[in-house]
């Protein structure tokens, strides 16, 4: 099964990066730009409207790793897993290894998602380092309509 992979060096402490990924408010700042729903075990992602664009089970949330399992959303995302592995760097920064795994096939939708993930992870990096986020719609590089 194909995977989307990204590696980012972020000049911010792992705790700051972790909090931006592991909290609804953090995800709003770098990704969705809209209030999100859920709790410690479920994350509902909203880009607009009153219906979530995607729902994730929070499988793991440790200082070293956050794992989401897609339970609802785009059909190509169903059953996929999103992993944010966070490694402390000797200089006080963080290495982020991002994986969106278990895609059934590599297709045009996956290509667009890879592009957008790269853009939103760049938003995460810029926000963690300087507080300058580029959440949706500013960070969307590949549009579906």
Image (cartoon, rainbow, N blue to C red):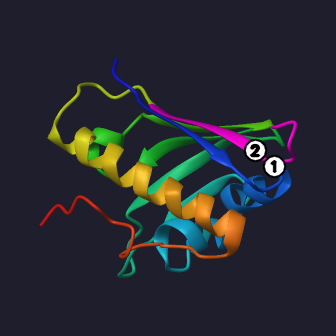
- Is the residue 72 above or below the residue 98 in the image? below
Task: Indicate which disc, 1 or 2, sits on the residue closer to the N terminus.
Answer: 1
**Local secondary structure at mark 1:** helix
Query: Of 131 and 32, which appears nearest the observer?
Result: 131
Q: List x then y, in percent, for residue 105.
A: 23, 25
Query: Of 108 and 50, which appears nearest the observer?
Result: 108
Q: List x then y, in percent, for residue 33.
A: 49, 77
| Residue 101 - label | none
Tell whether label 2 touches label 1 (CB within 8 Å).
yes
Residue located at (73% from left, 54% from top): 11
Residue segment shown in magenta: 89-100
What residue is pinned by disc 2?
A: 94
Q: In which quarter of the image is the N terminus?
A: top left
Q: Quadrant of the C terminus?
A: bottom left
Q: Quadrant of residue 106?
A: top left
Whether residue 30 is visible here, answered yes or no, is yes
- Is the residue 55 above or below the residue 66 in the image? below
Q: Quadrant of residue 88?
A: top right
Is 11 covered by the magenta stretch? no
What residue is pinned by disc 1?
A: 14
Q: Residue furthest front?
A: 91
**Local secondary structure at mark 2:** strand
């Amino acid at each position: 099964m194909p995977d989307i992979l990204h590696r980012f060096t972020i000049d911010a402490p792992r705790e700051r990066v972790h909090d931006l990924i592991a909290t609804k408010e953090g995800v709003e700042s770098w990704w969705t730009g809209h209030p999100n729903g859920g709790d410690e075990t479920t994350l509902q992602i909203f880009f607009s409207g009153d219906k979530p664009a995607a729902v994730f089970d929070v499988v793991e949330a440790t200082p070293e790793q956050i794992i989401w399992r897609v339970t609802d959303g785009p059909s190509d995302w169903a059953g996929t897993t999103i992993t944010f592995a966070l490694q402390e760097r000797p200089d006080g920064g963080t290495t982020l290894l991002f994986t969106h795994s278990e895609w059934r096939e590599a297709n045009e939708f996956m290509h667009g998602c890879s592009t957008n993930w790269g853009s939103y992870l760049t938003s995460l990096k810029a926000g963690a380092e300087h507080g300058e986020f580029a959440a949706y719609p500013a960070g969307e590089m590949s549009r579906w309509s």
